């Protein structure tokens, strides 16, 4: 249970930061004696401590002197091994049942050797450019267009030798005809293929498919360009002649970050900030990408997703055979060129001709997964969240902590308004890092507390500029000059950098922690260690489902895993227990008692805690009494007939208990029914699906009483976070019950129709992870920015009582907060823009700390620079949170329209200002945003915004709440699930098979597929799957014998079974929530559920297919442009 997140590992050299190893400072800071060991006043630099807390057997409050310096390697490595393993950062090994795998080890298809990796870092997108251009040219007019100037990533030194025109991240599909679906009989439509030099007129599309859920094109005069081929000589036949002048494009030379000069030659790999600069032509590479089928055209020989891969991600001069990915069997339909002509009209657009998420993900893995991402260069777009990569903190925060939608901000608000690209960051302050990345160091600035700017109170960071020989520093955020305190003084070297630059995390790293002083504590008092209170519904349903029995049994062992600080022997967290139905039962579990004592509070109108002494106890001291209690609870209520429950008083009771104990903490509430019993916070069943698609639909997402709003406020003030585990058999009003959880930074879990037998595994895994995870209590987060922009809006699970402080009763390692920035002045290109996120929190041992994350971004005066440095996954994270908040006050249709409109504006602005002039009939997308339409469509079709008949009101409210605190990786896979062809897995490799696109037509009847989205996990079996494979995995002889009720795969001793089970385990370990496995056989009735996640297809509830939606977006964009 160590909360290793804060373990700074001294013995653990951080790559590139050897300086840290020299300082064995290990002085201990104990909560009770905050000032006793601050050496900094005399000594050299010793600001930071390797560990925040005592080593070895010392208890946090012991105030004992430091143990040996430096900490033993063994201790370190133990700590390290535990750290970052997703679920098991805390404590001793879990039971087999709980076993998980290291997060960082899985899903690494990108690890195939790539021949040109030295060019890798910045690039996948730009590399694709020629592909798209080529595709565009070919499809647009003729195939014998001159080769585009190819881009390649030369060594860093060469990146300014730009010879070619700008690399536009344009993408064009043969969409020009889509909106003008003029049927032309006798002239079978054809899809533009490379090599076809047919005039565009022959592309004329068949009629719009009947079921397409798109507004008819009527009313919009069709631009003539839609009918004819793009004009010869236009951009279609070559690189656009009208690219922005090279003065802008490629733009400025790289800016080094203002503060953290990554002056470590050889450490900062030279990838230019503007990753998409033009590089000298390398003809040998120029044309390979044209083979790339991602933009169509190459559908033929490998009809499956294979086409995109035939040559795509490789930068070698020959396409790499990617055997495993090519499987002609895996698509039901024959290659297009073998189809009779009339069948070619089936699709107006070749699905392989539109941007493929898989292609983009795989390219990024290939190009950027192999080299560490160093954060020393300002405004650098990190690899995608789906890429497994190592990060080196060189002065900016790791993208695991902060990810932005735009890394090159527009200089003026006018520009921002024009492009409509939201300037937003997703911040995950306590994110878990993989084992090979150092957790933030802990810095101690002594009794005066962290060094800060006098005016804006920004914390010392790499961007602060020391002047006057080091006697003062100028703030990077507000420009104010602050005196350096004597104990912090240090001389500057000849470059103006402090001599101790590399020895102080706060001068050279993007992320670190400060020890906070009493000034940062509530009422200027060092906080008590937090408490966990388990509050168990013991009404009829909870007993009958087996929940109470299962939970009590599990708690006995789970209590050994409470979060622990560093190497502390035991957790400082105290625990308490409450059971309830219509009344509440408190338990005295004082260690001196022979048996636990129960106290019943039946007057729940004005909740109070009937006992103080003996309610919150140390687990080890009271172990026997606690175990006895947990034995007795299921028996005591075994025969209960009580079906009614209360809910508000339960939270109130927990809150009062924490108040009485003067500590922060967390309530774990296990609840089964709508609280109908007479009590504060009583609810009624107000579910009404008829409201869907009406103006009143928003009511379903709003709490039905303000009682819980007020309660949440009180909880936040006390630092009382609420985790809610729901076990409903019917409507429980998640929108209302979840409110306190939502506003206190808690987590919500829902197990509908819970049966211990079937759902126990999932629940217990979730519970374990939830109890054990790294967490900060009683937190406040503040985001400071340099002059010109400021944080204006926040999305996540928290409470805000003013416009700047994000109050979090608790914040755990899984929670992310999305922040939107707006201009309040002009930015300038030289200075860039700086963001500092400071999270003040109480650690699990009661230590008050500040975690600081810094990020510097570029600024631009050319929109093209903005569009080349965006990140669509982050953009989508923002959009979905914006939309899901929007449904509280708007009809879902309005919300959907708003999203479409803003996205269309983003793309239209690009088209108008950045893309070369070309036929209006062409859809041209910025490279970084080419997946915006497909991902946006997934959001629009989601259960919250467009529910099917089978989706319950509670599920919608539940999903809405979950999404609100998701990080970018989670929203990415949630909205576009990962679909892996199991039958293609390589049993000899640790890699996963390459994913395929989420569409039914990509499934082979002879295949087995695994689909996951972070919440759901399916294995789909095609009816023609080989018997051998079925036997190996399911231990039955034929498809018909497979039991689709299986919740786990049989443990068979053969490579296929082992590999698949290990894949399932690894995928589960990557996600914050345990996914229950569901087996789906082709054509079974459960298949509908599975198909719900095939996001590129038309959905049952009316959601558009990807192709149709792309057409729709195109139309929207054209309307904006006309
Ligand atoms: Zn300042």
Image (tube, helix red, strand yellow):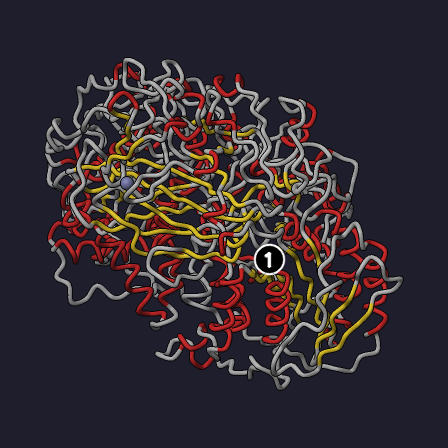
In the displayed structure, 904 sits above or below 848; it is below
Residue lying farthest bottom?
A: 678
x, y percent for residue 770: 63, 52
Which residue does the numbered mark 1 point to in the structure image?
Answer: 663
In the displayed structure, 273 sits above or below 1003; it is above
Q: Which residue is at 40% across, 20% downward?
A: 500
Residue 560 seen: yes
Q: Which residue is at 59% across, 72% downward?
A: 652
Q: Which residue is at 51% across, 80% downward?
A: 687
Q: Quadrant of the N terminus?
A: top right
Q: Is residue 901 left or right of residue 1051?
A: left
Q: Nearer the viewer, residue 855 or 178?
A: 855
Q: Nearer the viewer, residue 732 or 226?
A: 732
Secondary structure under badge 1?
Answer: loop
Q: Where on the image, by quarter, is ligand 1?
A: top left
Q: Nearer the viewer, residue 558 or 783?
A: 783
Q: Is residue 681 left or right of residue 590?
A: left
x, y percent for residue 79: 65, 32
x, y percent for residue 821: 28, 50
In the displayed structure, 508 sits above or below 137; it is above
**Corner quadrant of residue 385:** top left
Q: Nearer the viewer, residue 540 or 771?
A: 771
**Corner quadrant of residue 651:** bottom right
Residue 196 seen: no
Q: Is residue 533 left or right of residue 782?
A: right
């Amino acid at each position: 249970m160590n909360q290793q997140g804060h373990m700074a590992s001294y013995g653990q050299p951080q790559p590139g930061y050897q300086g840290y190893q020299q300082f064995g400072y290990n002085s201990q800071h104990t909560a009770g004696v905050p000032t006793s060991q601050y050496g900094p006043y005399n000594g050299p630099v010793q600001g930071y401590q390797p560990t925040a807390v005592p080593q070895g057997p010392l208890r946090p409050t012991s105030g004992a002197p430091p143990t040996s310096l430096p900490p033993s390697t063994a201790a370190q490595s133990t700590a390290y091994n535990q750290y970052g393993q997703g679920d098991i950062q805390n404590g001793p090994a879990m039971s087999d049942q709980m076993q998980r795998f290291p997060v960082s080890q899985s899903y690494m298809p990108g690890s195939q050797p790539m021949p040109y990796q030295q060019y890798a870092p910045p690039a996948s997108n730009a590399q694709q450019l020629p592909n798209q251009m080529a595709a565009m040219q070919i499809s647009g007019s003729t195939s014998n267009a001159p080769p585009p100037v190819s881009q390649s990533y030369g060594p860093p030194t060469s990146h300014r030798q730009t010879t070619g025109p700008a690399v536009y991240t344009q993408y064009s599909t043969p969409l020009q005809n889509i909106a003008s679906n003029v049927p032309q009989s006798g002239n079978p439509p054809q899809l533009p293929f490379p090599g076809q030099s047919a005039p565009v007129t022959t592309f004329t599309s068949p009629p719009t498919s009947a079921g397409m859920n798109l507004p008819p094109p009527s009313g919009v005069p069709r631009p003539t360009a839609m009918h004819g081929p793009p004009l010869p000589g236009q951009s279609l036949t070559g690189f656009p002649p009208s690219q922005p002048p090279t003065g802008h494009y490629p733009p400025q030379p790289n800016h080094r970050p203002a503060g953290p000069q990554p002056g470590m030659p050889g450490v900062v790999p030279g990838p230019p900030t503007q990753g998409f600069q033009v590089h000298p032509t390398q003809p040998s590479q120029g044309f390979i990408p044209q083979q790339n089928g991602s933009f169509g055209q190459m559908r033929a020989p490998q009809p499956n997703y294979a086409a995109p891969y035939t040559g795509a991600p490789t930068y070698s001069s020959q396409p790499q055979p990617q055997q495993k990915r090519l499987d002609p069997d895996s698509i039901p339909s024959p290659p297009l060129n073998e189809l009779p002509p009339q069948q070619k009209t089936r699709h107006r657009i070749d699905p392989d001709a539109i941007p493929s998420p898989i292609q983009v993900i795989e390219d990024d893995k290939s190009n950027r997964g192999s080299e560490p991402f160093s954060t020393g260069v300002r405004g650098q777009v990190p690899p995608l969240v789906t890429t497994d990569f190592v990060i080196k903190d060189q002065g900016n925060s790791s993208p695991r902590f902060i990810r932005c939608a735009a890394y090159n901000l527009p200089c003026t608000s006018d520009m921002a308004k024009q492009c409509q690209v939201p300037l937003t960051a997703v911040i995950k302050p306590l994110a878990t890092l993989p084992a090979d990345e150092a957790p933030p160091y802990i810095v101690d600035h002594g009794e005066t507390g962290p060094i800060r700017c006098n005016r804006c109170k920004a914390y010392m960071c790499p961007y602060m500029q020391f002047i006057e020989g080091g006697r003062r520093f100028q703030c990077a955020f507000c420009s104010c000059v602050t005196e350096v305190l004597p104990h912090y003084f240090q001389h500057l070297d000849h470059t103006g950098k402090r001599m101790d630059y590399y020895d102080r995390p706060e001068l050279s790293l993007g992320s670190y922690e400060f020890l906070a002083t009493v000034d940062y504590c509530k009422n200027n008092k060092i906080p008590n260690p937090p408490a966990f209170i388990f509050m168990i519904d013991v009404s009829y349903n909870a007993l009958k489902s087996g929940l109470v029995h299962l939970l009590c049994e599990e708690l006995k062992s789970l209590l050994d895993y409470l979060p622990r600080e560093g190497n502390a022997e035991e957790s400082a967290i105290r625990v308490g227990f409450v059971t309830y139905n219509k009344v509440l039962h408190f338990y005295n579990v004082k260690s001196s008692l022979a048996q636990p004592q129960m106290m019943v509070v039946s007057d729940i109108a004005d909740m109070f805690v009937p006992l103080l002494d003996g309610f919150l106890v140390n687990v080890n001291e009271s172990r026997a009494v606690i175990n006895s209690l947990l034995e007795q609870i299921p028996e005591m209520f075994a025969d209960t007939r009580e079906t009614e429950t209360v809910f508000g008083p339960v939270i109130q009771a927990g809150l009062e208990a924490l108040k009485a104990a003067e500590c922060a903490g967390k309530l774990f509430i296990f609840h089964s029914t709508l609280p109908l019993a007479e009590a504060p916070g009583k609810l009624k069943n107000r579910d009404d699906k008829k409201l869907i698609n009406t103006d009143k639909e928003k009511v379903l997402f709003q709490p039905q009483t303000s009682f819980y709003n007020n309660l949440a406020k009180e909880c936040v003030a006390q630092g009382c976070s609420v985790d809610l585990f729901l076990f409903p058999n019917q409507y429980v009003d998640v929108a209302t019950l979840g409110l306190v959880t939502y506003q206190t930074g808690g987590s919500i879990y829902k197990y509908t129709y819970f049966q211990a037998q079937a759902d126990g595994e999932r629940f217990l895994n979730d519970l374990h992870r939830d109890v054990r995870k790294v967490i900060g209590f009683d937190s406040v987060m503040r985001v400071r920015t340099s002059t010109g922009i400021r944080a204006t809006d926040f999305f996540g699970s928290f409470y805000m009582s003013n416009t700047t402080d994000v109050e979090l009763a608790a914040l755990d390692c899984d929670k992310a907060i999305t922040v939107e920035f707006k201009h309040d002045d002009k930015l300038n290109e030289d200075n860039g823009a700086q963001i500092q996120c400071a999270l003040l929190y109480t650690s699990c041992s009661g230590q008050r700390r500040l975690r600081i994350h810094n990020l510097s971004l570029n600024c631009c005066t050319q929109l093209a620079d903005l569009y080349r440095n965006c990140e669509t996954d982050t953009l989508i994270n923002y959009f979905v949170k914006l939309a899901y908040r929007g449904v509280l006050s708007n009809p879902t249709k309005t919300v959907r329209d708003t999203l479409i409109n803003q996205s269309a504006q983003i793309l239209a602005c690009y088209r108008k200002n950045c893309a070369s002039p070309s036929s209006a009939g062409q859809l041209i997308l910025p490279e970084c945003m080419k997946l915006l339409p497909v991902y946006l469509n997934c959001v629009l079709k989601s259960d919250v915004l467009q529910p099917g008949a089978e989706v319950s009101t509670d599920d919608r409210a539940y999903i809405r709440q979950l999404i609100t605190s998701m990080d970018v990786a989670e929203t990415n896979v949630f909205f576009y699930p990962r679909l892996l062809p199991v039958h293609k897995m390589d049993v000899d490799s640790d890699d996963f098979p390459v994913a395929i696109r989420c569409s039914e037509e990509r499934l082979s009847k002879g295949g087995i597929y695994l689909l996951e989205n972070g919440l759901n996990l399916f294995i789909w079996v095609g009816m023609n799957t080989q018997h051998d494979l079925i036997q190996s995995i399911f231990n039955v002889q034929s498809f018909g014998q497979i039991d689709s009720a299986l919740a786990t795969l049989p443990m068979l001793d053969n490579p296929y079974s082992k590999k698949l089970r290990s894949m399932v385990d690894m995928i589960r370990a990557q996600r914050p929530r345990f996914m229950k496995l569901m087996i789906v056989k082709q054509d079974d009735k459960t298949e509908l559920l599975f198909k719900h996640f095939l996001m590129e297809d038309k959905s049952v509830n009316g959601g558009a297919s990807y192709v149709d939606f792309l057409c729709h977006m195109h139309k929207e964009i054209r309307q904006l442009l006309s």
